[in-house]
Amino acid sequence: MVEHLSEEELTDLFKCVSDETRRSLLVKLCQEGPCRVTELASHYDMSLNAISKHLKVLEKCSLISRSTEGRTHWLKANLSEIHKIEAWLDGLRSIWEIRLDRLAKLIETEERDD
């Protein structure tokens, strides 16, 4: 079942992934699975504080979640939130597929009439 997003939720998700660093962090977590914050930050040429700010934005939108074991913070991608973005994009894709099908039928009809 596809969960419908409010415009505000959708806007927040797209704002969250509008930044290149945040998209990259999200991709790394999707590809590599749960990571420690310091391990994830080691891939970037920026301070741990800067990375932490990006991670907080991703957490606020629930695209990632954090768990703590002692002093170690683990991050993981929240695929259910990512699927919400995917579902919205799939809706756009289906609209374009319908339009392209109509265009193909129109062209086919024009070619037969010639």
Image: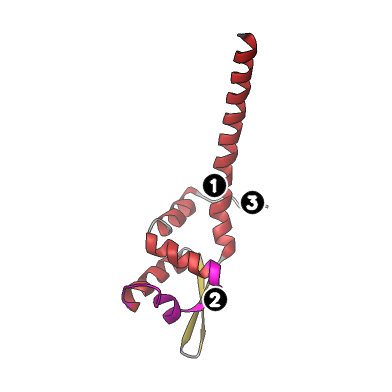
Residue density around tag 2, few if under 14, some if 14–19, many if 20 or more, within 10 Å: some
Residue 77 appears in the rendering: no
- In the image, farthest residue toward the top: 114
Image position of 103 with respect to 68: above or below = above
Image position of 87 with respect to 110: above or below = below
Residue 50 appears in the rendering: yes
- Is residue 69 part of the magenta span, yes or no? no
* x then y, percent, for residue 63: 50, 64
Q: Nearer the viewer, mark 3 or mark 2?
A: 2
Secondary element type, mark 1: helix
Res. 97 image quadrant: top right
Q: Nearer the viewer, mark 1 or mark 3?
A: 1
Q: Which residue is mark 1?
A: 89
Q: Earlier in the sequence, mark 1 or mark 2?
A: 2
Q: Nearer the viewer, residue 105 or 56?
A: 105
Q: Quadrant of the C terminus?
A: top right
- What is the CA distance from the residue labelled 1 to the residue labelled 2? 26 Å
Dot label at residue 14: none
Amino acid of disc 1: Leu
- Left or right of 102, for residue 51: left
Q: Which residue is mark 2?
A: 34
- What is the CA distance from the residue labelled 1 to the residue labelled 3? 12 Å
Q: Earlier in the sequence, mark 3 or mark 2?
A: 3
Q: Are marks 3 and 2 in contact (CB under 8 Å)?
A: no
Q: Nearer the viewer, residue 84 or 104?
A: 104
- Residue range of the region highlighted in magenta in the rendering: 30-47
Q: Which residue is mark 3?
A: 2
- Is residue 41 part of the magenta span, yes or no? yes
- What is the CA distance from the residue labelled 3 to the residue labelled 2? 26 Å
Amino acid of disc 3: Val
Residue density around tag 1, few if under 14, some if 14–19, many if 20 or more, within 10 Å: few
For image coordinates 62% across by 29% down, the residue present is 101
